[in-house]
Amino acid sequence: MAKNITPLTVYRFLPKTNCGECEQKTCMAFASALIDRKATVEECPPILDPKFEKDRRELDDLLRPPVREISIGTDAAGVLVGGEEVIRRHELTYFNRTALAIEVSDELEPDEVKKRANSIAEVVFERVGDTLKLDLIAVRCASGDPQRFAEAASRCLEAGMPMILCALNPSEIGPALERVGDARPLIYAASQDNWEEMADLAMKYKCPLVVSADTLETLAEITGKVRAKGLTDIVLDPGTYPYSGGLGKTIDNFTKARVAAIGDDQEIVGYPLMGIPAVVWMDEGESSTKALREAMLASALIGRYADLLILKTMKPWAHLSVMTLRQNLYTDPRKPVAVDAGLHEYGSPDSSSPLLLTTNFALTFYTVESDIQASNVTCYLLVIDTEGIGVQSSVAGGQLDPTKVADAINESGIKDRIDHKILVVPGMAARLKGDIEDA
């Protein structure tokens, strides 16, 4: 469950000056914004003063989620993973979507490396008004050549996306970090055999580090050693085993790790979880079958708390299926998905074009919009602010009423743009017809 923190508890650690520098009118309002994660502690300039250092540390500890939020990349082009506070979404919400990375092998020719990296950056889908895209490039040292790996990392950096450097040998990671360390890539991975060298590299270049192990016990042991060296930006890899009964073990490990972090407050496993569905490509078989298995495995791990996944396929259907699941799972259940209210134009409408009406519930709006576009209808569409609620529910609950429709018509200025008084309302709002005419 999420921490039961009240604004008054947070207020105790704030300067209590009501200075307004945080864009909130009072410190109490800022405390509420911090709890809702609509603001960060750094947005309060007075608390950055050294005299408030103790209060700031205590406030950071109070607000820190059970799963630490880790930043990969630089502020300008970074991605956040982790930061979750609940096991089940309906208890609060999930915050940072599962980050999706695509593997790029350094065995490719230099031009092919750059081409694949650019292709990854160009993967973009629009769905229900949301932009779906890939988040990272995972550069894998398959050649065993540190210089070739470093060159591949440099070429991938040009694509402008956060990166993961994948190699188990510190001597291969080192030269790559010399080239791209300033971009704060995620280092994969610290194991039982190399954790000390990998941790030293992560500390030197101030990069986050993946800790990888076959069992949760070993994972916790290595994590403790890495933390003892002063590293806090850690990602956990409990292992991804898609064959020979290993999928059950994989799902079990992910679930146990997240329940331990949030349900049992075990800080040692309170870090983002990473899965590697790309391991299916190590098996024999058709590429299309592997892509399907990879997408299925990725979907299973998203449903079991994976914060970061590495894929290999570049099939659009695989990307879209995984992204769609991710989009739906990371929708905030506390508020309906809504679009902006207002007047929309389709085609080149004139004074005789029809005027349609709908609500600002995203699913309703985009369904109506797609029908309009598919029919090539030139028209106006008036979107009413119903607080993101659909037609039937908003009519029943009063969010869609004649007064609100009349106000929207007047505010939109549509009366001056058409020479008729015909308004096409949704069928489920037909009972409002007479009242709308009177309004």
Image (cartoon, rainbow, N blue to C red):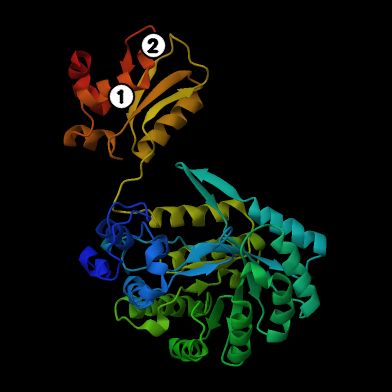
From this viewpoint, is residue 349 visible?
yes
Residue 396 image point, x, y percent: 17, 34
What's the residue at 23%, 69% (across, down)? 9
Which of the two labelled residues, at mark 1 and mark 2, occupies the earlier sequence position? Answer: 1
What's the residue at 75%, 70% (across, down)? 106
Where disc 1 sits, the SS reads: helix
The reply, left or right, for residue 154 in relation to residue 430 is right
Please tell me which residue lies in front, 244 or 410.
Answer: 410
Residue 36 image point, x, y percent: 31, 59
Please tell me which residue lies in front, 58 or 36.
Answer: 58
The reply, left or right, for residue 86 in relation to residue 136 is left
Please state which amino acid type lies under the numbered disc 2.
Asp
The reply, left or right, for residue 312 in relation to residue 238 is right
What's the residue at 44%, 53% (across, down)? 327
Against 227, residue 10 (above or below) is: above
Mark on residue 416? 2
Q: Which residue is mark 1?
A: 408
Q: CA distance from mark 1 to mark 2?
A: 14 Å
Q: How many marks?
A: 2
Residue 399: quadrant of the picture = top left
Residue 97 image point, x, y percent: 45, 60
On-image quarter of the C terminus: top left
